[in-house]
Image (cartoon, rainbow, N blue to C red):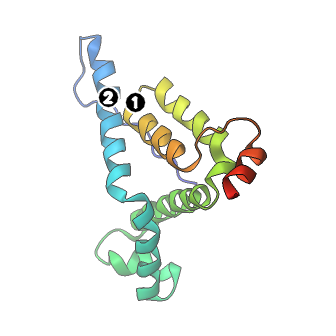
Amino acid sequence: MTQIPATESPVPSDHEDDAGFEAMRRDAVLGGRAMSSGAFLAGLIASAELETVGRPDKLAADLFPDADPATVQAVWDRALAVGFHAGRLSSAPRLFRDQMDRVAGAFEQAGFHAMAGLVRRSRALVAPEVDGLAADSEIAREH
């Protein structure tokens, strides 16, 4: 899996608040990217993209024929990994409660409050807290 390196601020700073601001800026940018992706619609879009070109290996090059093929492939590989994992989460969110809590905590600790809020909101919507044993709550809900 390709790692995206952290970017450094191009302008050195003498202010202690700049590190906090930079974390907030990165958080806002990443949070905005996640929101604009349209979590549910992304799967539908991916399906439509593949259906229009026929094979996954053709998709990246087909959509961006004038771009550097290695860069397009690297971006595609990362997006595919993210999309696949998001699909796993959405297919059985109750199985990923602990993971979503851990990830939200990691975002919070890094100062990425918008991203943490997005994860916590999604977790609350699809895998809410239950009273008692989870199995008992699910049985009660079915009746």
Q: Quadrant of the N terminus?
A: bottom right
In the rendered image, the residue lying farthest to the front is: 143
Left or right side of 37 for 143: right
Residue at 77% x, 47% y is 135
How many numbered circles are shown? 2
Residue for badge 1: 113
Q: Nearer the viewer, residue 87 or 127?
A: 127
Q: How far across and down, in percent of the image, does residue 61 sit?
A: 40, 77
> Amino acid type of disc 2?
Met
Is residue 8 visible to the viewer in this orientation of the structure? yes
Left or right side of 129 for 77: left
Q: How far across and down, in percent of the image, does residue 37 sit?
A: 36, 58
- Circle nearer the N terminus (2, 1): 2
Please say if the residues under marks 2 and 1 sit with CB atoms less than 8 Å apart. yes
Is residue 70 visible to the viewer in this orientation of the structure? no
Left or right side of 142 for 14: left
Mark 2 element type? helix
34 vs 66: above or below: above
131 vs 109: above or below: below
Residue for badge 2: 24
Mark 1 element type? helix
Q: Quadrant of the C terminus?
A: bottom right
Residue at 35% x, 68% y is 68
Residue at 24% x, 31% y is 10
Residue at 52% x, 34% y is 104
Crowd around label 2: few <14 · some 14–19 · many ≥20 (10 Å): some
> Amino acid type of disc 1?
His
Q: How far across and down, in percent of the image, does residue 19 sit?
A: 33, 19
